[in-house]
Image (cartoon, rainbow, N blue to C red):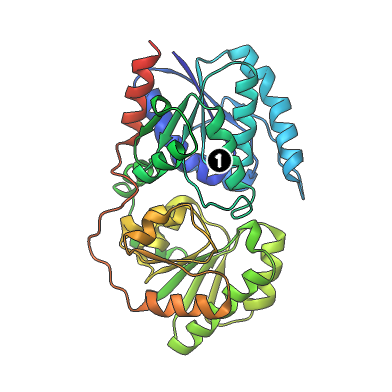
């Protein structure tokens, strides 16, 4: 059996690497294709997991549009797939890389497996373009690896064949298990900051860029000033994000603005934070493993399990609602909670399912 794994962004590496390594460590024939949709962030993660792509499509250009990414990925990946002829192609999540690779494989009649299938926000434009990407990928895949029961139910409601759907948990927990035992969180954290009383913030969503992001930053800044707490913020490389951050909090003494960090250092920051303010999807899944409450600074979330478990709050993006949510998070104290997204055995489940079908 020859398995091909495709990624192009930091979250994809995190959630694909455990499955790739599980297959590889069992002696399976594996091919790794990197699109480099986000060059620096992807390369940073590759080093963490000590993996090396067999092919690098190198599609990233300055100010690239979504259509440009789709076009370049599909054009460059097709000859590789035709040459290698894998038995299956794995894509992960909701990125433009995942959609493009899925379509290219589908056009060549190669079965596709979707890691993290079935997540839905219910709004095609929020998150954009991820919500549409997910739906298109799920329709065309042979294997739908849903992280939760709710994700499976989403797929069934859309009329997808139950025989294609498998609940396996989220592979991000596998990644955490691979890493946490090997690192000293406190030592890594001290390489970045000297504070032990802070909020961790991440913001980068395309649909939040503009006034929404400014409102989130202003609410957080007001809270930080009134409560004398620092905000540690690894700032995304997107120049539009950086401009807003610089204008709103660039000179704010309560904010510790740092460059994007590798996954190990990010986990160390998550480990030490009082709570998290984010518009990221992955952080919503990782935070419960560190007993951290999450303020989700978005209008929707495709991970409602976090909210339903009482481990986060969907704050919206207005200054008033975000401030209120942060104030509530400050009163929370989570201890030894169970992560609703997985148990660290997702890669094993995926392997057994695939191996049972493809001998």
Query: Which residue corresponds to the image point at 51% horizontal and 41% vertical from the top-left?
Result: 93
Q: Quadrant of residue 239?
A: bottom right
Residue located at (48% from left, 52% from top): 302
Q: Does any portion of residue 50 appear in the rendered image?
A: no
Q: Position of residue 168 (x, y in %)?
A: 34, 36
Residue projecting furthest to the bottom:
226
In the picture, the quarter occupied by the C terminus is: top left
3 relative to 60, above or below: above
- Mark 1 is surrounded, within 10 Å at the Cα level, by few (under 14), some (14 to 19) or many (20 or more) other residues, namely many
Q: Is residue 155 above or below residue 286?
A: above
Residue 181, compared with residue 35, is above or below; it is below
Which residue sits at x=57%, y=13%?
85
The residue that mark 1 highlights is: 134
Question: Which structural element holds mark 1?
Answer: helix
Is 128 in front, or is 350?
A: 128
Across and down, in percent, residue 61 comes to: 75, 43
**Could you say which is closer to the camera, residue 136 or residue 2?**
136
- Classify the position of the N terminus by image quarter: top left
Which residue lies most toward the top here?
Answer: 359
């Amino acid at each position: 059996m020859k398995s091909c794994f495709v990624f192009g962004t930091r979250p994809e590496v995190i959630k694909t690497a455990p499955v790739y390594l599980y297959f590889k460590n069992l002696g399976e024939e594996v091919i790794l294709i990197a699109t480099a949709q986000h060059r620096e962030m992807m390369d940073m993660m590759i080093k963490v997991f000590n993996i090396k792509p067999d092919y690098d499509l190198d599609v990233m250009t300055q100010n690239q549009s979504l259509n440009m990414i789709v076009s370049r990925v599909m054009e460059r990946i097709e000859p590789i797939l035709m040459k290698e002829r894998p038995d299956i192609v794995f894509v992960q999540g909701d990125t433009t890389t995942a959609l493009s690779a899925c379509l290219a494989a589908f056009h060549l009649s190669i079965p596709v497996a979707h890691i993290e299938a079935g997540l839905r926000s219910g709004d095609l434009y929020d998150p954009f373009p991820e919500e549409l990407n997910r739906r298109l990928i799920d329709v065309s895949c042979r294997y739908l690896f849903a992280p939760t029961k709710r994700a499976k139910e989403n797929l069934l409601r859309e009329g997808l064949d139950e025989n294609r759907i498998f609940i396996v948990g989220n592979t991000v927990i596998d990644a955490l298990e691979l890493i946490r035992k090997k690192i000293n969180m406190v030592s890594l954290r001290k390489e970045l900051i000297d504070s032990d009383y802070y909020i961790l913030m991440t913001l980068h969503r395309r649909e939040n860029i503009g006034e929404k992001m400014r409102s989130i930053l202003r609410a957080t800044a007001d809270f930080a000033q009134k409560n004398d707490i620092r905000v540690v913020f690894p700032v995304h490389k997107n120049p539009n994000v950086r401009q807003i951050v610089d204008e709103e909090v660039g000179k704010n003494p309560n904010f510790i603005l740092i460059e994007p960090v590798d996954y190990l250092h990010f986990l160390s920051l998550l480990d030490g934070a009082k709570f998290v303010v984010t518009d990221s999807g992955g952080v919503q899944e990782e935070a419960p493993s560190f007993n951290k409450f999450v303020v989700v600074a978005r209008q929707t979330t495709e991970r409602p399990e976090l909210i339903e478990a009482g481990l986060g709050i969907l704050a919206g993006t207005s200054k008033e609602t975000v401030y209120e949510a942060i104030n509530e998070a400050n009163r929370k104290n989570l201890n030894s909670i169970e992560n609703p997204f997985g148990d660290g055995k997702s890669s094993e489940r995926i392997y057994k399912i695939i191996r049972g079908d493809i001998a």
